[in-house]
Image: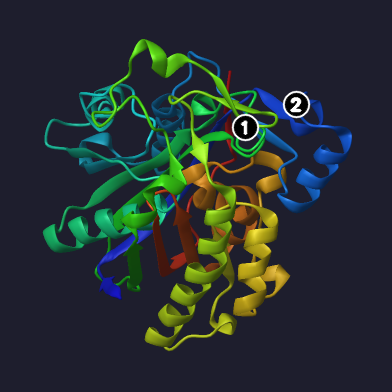
């Protein structure tokens, strides 16, 4: 286990932004009516948000950050850390976090960098920003987490396009010597990296003219090597075995049980898979919120987006004990637990 804890920081607030453009899987023309019913029932994704070309993940993160900074009444000159956790960078280079430092009007003394993680990104990101701030004593930080996943999915790929949605969130972290600890367990299995992959476009397989050629890889499924390739069965088997095992080990290590937590927030992968995990771990339905039906699988943003969407009333008015789990592309997965105490959590922002 890569188990560790951090002290001296707390979550001051969480905000989220999504594109206003909503699309429904009931309108998806590459599925039959029966397939649509089955997908919505088992995978859980009825609607999701799709960012037009002029809205990037950083645009969504910027909007969420401006709102949260205002609600917290933070002086931007006091913000010392900015981490952008995403696989949807503005450019190959420079770092998107550097661009956001300027857009947000943060001082030159800001530590700003990108973390290229997907489904497990929120858990990994929390461990990074909390470790940095706890060790250094830096007082205020922002972690922007999100992806525009649909742009890399082929519209004619019914194995991936119906699943994903676009969103970004920001979590404000504040140094606090009296705060409760964060606990983490982070895991990786790179031998299964091909389970979720965009084969071309990086340095390993640089894009060529042929990279844009769409082929029918199986009946009704078309994509090019520049599109997301998802091996659904491999991901399913990984998720229902490794994920609950890691969470059980985490609870043993922290001497906790499901009864110790007010909410168990999972990466919003798909309903049947997440429900299998929930039942194995014996969490109640009341403890486990979902946003799959409204936003789909929003990659690294799915955990904080679900907190903002489904737990806003509670998280702003009472203390809450959380356990969260992110898992997927990499393959990478992680667990974290923490306590919040009446944090800022504005309504979800919509961009058009």
Position of the N terminus, as image quadrant, is bottom left
Residue 322 in sight in this render: no
Query: Residue 197, image x and y in percent?
Result: 42, 39
In this rendering, the answer to whether 76 lies above or below 189 is above
In front of the other: 315 or 171: 171
Please state which of residues 230 and 56 is positioned toward the viewer in this rendering: 230
Measured Cα–Cα span from mark 2 to mark 1: 10 Å
In the rendering, at what x and y percent does residue 69 appear? 39, 38
Q: Is residue 122 above or below residue 82?
A: below
Q: In which quarter of the image is the C terminus?
A: top right
Q: In this view, does 250 lie above or below 28?
A: below
Outermost residue on the top side: it is 209
Front in this rendered view, residue 181 or 116: 116
Where does label 1 land, which residue? Answer: 161
Labelled pair 2, 1 in contact (Cβ < 8 Å): yes
Query: Does dot 1 land on a helix, a strand or a loop?
Result: loop
Per the image, the residue denoted by label 2 is 30
Rate crowding at label 1 as few (under 14), some (14 to 19) or many (20 or more) other CA atoms within 10 Å: many
Work out whether 115 lies above or below 239.
above
Q: Residue at x 41, y 67 (%)?
A: 336
Helix, strand or loop at label 2? It is loop
Q: Residues within 10 Å of mark 2 (few under 14, many from 20)?
A: some
Determine whether, in the image, residue 217 is placed left or right of residue 133.
right
Q: Provide residue 139's location: percent of width, then percent of height.
A: 21, 53
Q: Which of marks 2 and 1 is nearer the N terminus?
A: 2
Q: Which residue is at 50% across, 61% downward? A: 342
In the rendered view, does 52 fall on the left or right side of 1?
Answer: right
């Amino acid at each position: 286990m890569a188990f560790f804890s951090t002290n001296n920081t707390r979550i001051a607030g969480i905000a989220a932004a999504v594109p206003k453009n909503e699309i429904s899987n009931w309108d998806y023309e590459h599925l039959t009516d029966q397939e649509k019913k089955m997908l919505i029932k088992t995978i859980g994704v009825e609607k999701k948000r799709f960012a037009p070309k002029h809205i990037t993940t950083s645009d969504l993160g910027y909007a969420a950050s401006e709102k949260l900074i205002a609600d917290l009444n933070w002086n931007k000159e006091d913000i010392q850390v900015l981490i952008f956790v995403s696989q949807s960078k503005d450019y190959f280079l420079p770092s998107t976090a550097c661009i956001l430092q300027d857009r947000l009007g943060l001082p030159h003394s800001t530590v700003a960098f990108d973390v290229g993680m997907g489904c497990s990104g929120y858990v990994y990101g929390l461990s990074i920003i909390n470790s940095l701030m706890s060790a250094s004593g830096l007082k205020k930080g922002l972690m922007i987490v999100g992806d525009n996943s649909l742009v890399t999915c082929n519209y004619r790929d019914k194995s991936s396009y119906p699943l994903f949605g676009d969103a970004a969130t920001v979590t404000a972290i504040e140094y606090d010597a009296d705060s409760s600890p964060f606990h983490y367990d982070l895991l990786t299995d790179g031998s299964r990296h091909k389970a979720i992959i965009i084969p071309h476009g990086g340095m390993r397989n640089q894009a060529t003219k042929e990279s844009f050629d769409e082929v029918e890889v199986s009946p009704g499924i078309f994509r090019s090597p520049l599109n997301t390739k998802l091996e659904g069965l491999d991901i399913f088997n990984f998720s229902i075995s490794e994920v609950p095992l890691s969470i059980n080990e985490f609870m043993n290590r922290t001497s906790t049980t499901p009864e110790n937590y007010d909410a168990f927030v999972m990466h919003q992968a798909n309903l049947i898979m997440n429900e299998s995990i929930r039942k194995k771990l014996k969490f109640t339905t009341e403890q486990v919120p979902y946003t799959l039906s409204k936003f789909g699988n929003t990659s690294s943003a799915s955990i904080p987006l679900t907190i903002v969407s489904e737990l806003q009333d509670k998280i702003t008015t009472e203390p809450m004990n959380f356990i969260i789990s992110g898992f997927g592309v990499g393959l990478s997965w992680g667990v974290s637990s923490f306590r919040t105490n009446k944090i800022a959590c504005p309504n979800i922002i919509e961009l058009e």
